[in-house]
Amino acid sequence: ADYIDSEIIAHMVACLKEYPNTRTILDIGGEDSKLMLVKDGVLVNFQMNKDCGGGTGAMIEAIATRLGVRIENVGEIALKSKSPANLPGKCGIFCQSAVVSELNKGRPISDILMGVCRALVGNYLAVLAKGKRLYEPIVFQGATAQNVALVKCFEESLKKPVLVPGNCSYMG
């Protein structure tokens, strides 16, 4: 339990139990993000971002609170977006500041939330997946995988389907 990678292994074991052919595991947690690459049931590579909350569920939660939106409703509201805001995703503080600016300009909350989801996914892929090939099947785990807008953003960015387990928030 003292070994730092135990959470990584837990994610992989839980995922392979439900999806034995998984090749890529995406995880955006409340305070960190992880990317795990699997081949023939063996973890071959992983990347973890634990230095900044900018690309995590904490960022979405802080923004949702600021906007007066329940975290459980963020995805459904974001999917109603007609013109997503272009927001910075590398820093949670900069993103929150940009959200306030967009809100003050009268931007619809749905456009802001979809912008947040796109920024988060863009940052995740730029930081964790840089230089890596993500093979299917791709499984998205963690509580943020319940956000349907994040799933859509991953699918659009990767141009591949993304599976979400029913118990995604407990798999790590």
Image: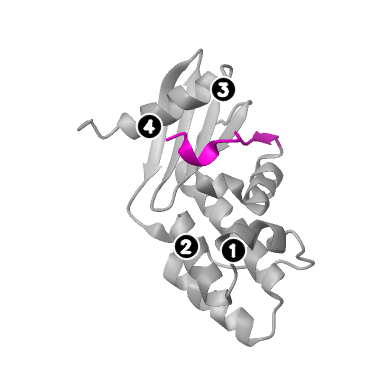
Cα distance between the residues tagged 3 and 1:
30 Å
Q: Is residue 164 magenta?
A: yes
Q: Is the residue 117 above or below the residue 162 in the image?
A: below
Q: Say left or right for 38 vs 165.
A: left
In three-dimensional space, the C-alpha distance between marks 4 and 2, rounded to whole angstroms, equals 22 Å
> How far is disc 2 from disc 3 in space, using C-alphas?
29 Å
Q: CA distance from mark 4 to mark 1?
A: 26 Å
Query: Considering only vertical position in the picture, is 57 above or below 42?
Result: below
Q: Which one is closest to the eye, mark 3 or mark 1?
A: 3
What amino acid type is highlighted by mark number 4? Ile
Is 145 contained in the magenta span?
no
Residue at mark 3: 18
Marks 2 and 1, the one that precedes in the sequence: 2
> Above or below — where is 98 with respect to 132?
below
Residue marked by disc 1: 116
Give the residues drawn in magenta, as a range.
160-172
Residue 39 screen position, x and y as percent: 50, 17
Residue kind at label 3, given as amino acid type: Glu
Pointer 4 and pointer 2: residues touching (CB < 8 Å)?
A: no
Question: Mark 4 or 1 closer to N-term?
Answer: 4
Other-residue count near label 1 (Cα within 10 Å), few / some / many at <14 / 14–19 / ≥20? many
Kindly indicate whether the residue at mark 1 contacts the one at mark 2 (C-beta within 8 angstroms).
yes
